[in-house]
Amino acid sequence: MALTGKGQAATSVTMQPSPGRHTYQCESGRTRAVDRAAHCFAALPTRFTFTVDVESHPGGSCAAAPTRRLLDLLDESGSHGTFFVLDDVLRADPVLVREIARRGHEVASHGHAHRHLAAEGPAAFRTGMTAARARLADCLGVAPIGYRAPYFSLTPAAAWAPAILTELGFAYSSSVLPARSLLAGWPGAPARPFRWPDGLVEVPVPLGRIGPLALPFLGGMYLRWLPPWRLRALARDWATTGQDGALWSYCHPYDLDPDARLVHRPDAGWLGSLMLWLNRGSMLPRLEGLLRGRRSVPFVATLDEMAATAQLWQPGGGGTSPQKGR
């Protein structure tokens, strides 16, 4: 998941194209990588939602170039996704945001600042999100209805957030990681789409389990680092749950940026910073493999379907009720 914060550059690495980069051998190796990835995800449903958290990353370039590569990838597969845009990116590059919408994708909000919700508090969150949503509406001519919290930080410490999002006009959130996590999580939250008491629909992070660990295996650093055999096993396990319609992946523009400098991230530590930096070359083939034989539709296109079966969940109040609908 996203781990954006301030840090100092620890070292720089210059990535130079190797001789023969575009030779047959190189292209053949790429094709094999995509084939392996497609095999890993073969058990998953043929419909899912491809999501992108559009944010810049310390030590890397701006988000524009890798975001456009993701747009091209979706064009090539005939798919459309949901792009959660951070307010800083919108203010820096409104042309990019308009291009995302023009190419047929849903533009949603990734927040007004990349901070944990609990660190903000209700008043600052309401003020910031009111302004961020208005800027997106001014840019696109239509207000966003979707929201994703930085770090998936809709946790028990930020239980006030859904009511504010509903008040501001959002219809759904994709912000809960329903398990324990090193960064943020809500153990005990439903794994399927559910409704908050105020009516907001929540689309939780799809998780795969390795022993006691629950991992968002279709996103970010996890998608880059998990070995193919493990991804295949997790995909098969997830497919047995029958949650068709709630499956989604996530990535960031920086996941496709191998030329970025290594930056020490105080919020990730040295090991986390290194893992966020390395192995970015594996991301694009894995995303291509995920899209092969599969169609991505944005959340907005499946919202009514998810809302119709979403159960009401009252945190700390007895779990889910049999009530359904929005």
Image (tube, grey):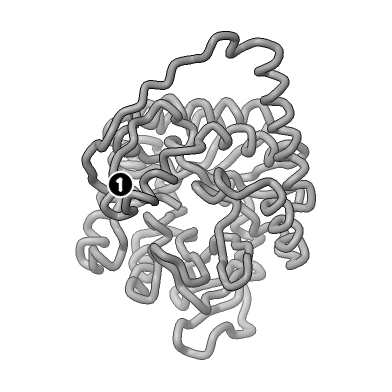
Q: Is residue 134 visible?
A: yes
Q: Is residue 30 above or below residue 189?
A: above
Image position of 41 (left or right of 224): right
Residue depicted at x 59% and y 54%:
217
x and y, in percent, of residue 279 in the image: 51, 37
Q: Is residue 29 above or below residue 155?
A: above
Q: Which quadrant does the C terminus fall into?
A: bottom right
Residue depicted at x 68% and y 18%:
27
Image position of 232 (left or right of 115): right
In the picture as drawn, the residue positioned furthest to the bottom comes out as 318
Residue depicted at x 26% and y 52%:
266
**Residue located beneath label 1 in the image:** 134
User: Circle 1: is it few (<14), some (14-19), or many (20+) Cα within 10 Å?
Assistant: some
x and y, in percent, of residue 46 in the image: 76, 47
Amino acid of disc 1: Ala
x and y, in percent, of residue 278 in the image: 46, 38
Q: Is residue 30 above or below residue 246?
A: above
Dividing the picture into quarters, in which one does residue 288 lie?
Answer: top right
Residue depicted at x 47% and y 67%:
200
Taking depth in this image into account, of 106 and 36 the one nearest to the observer is 36
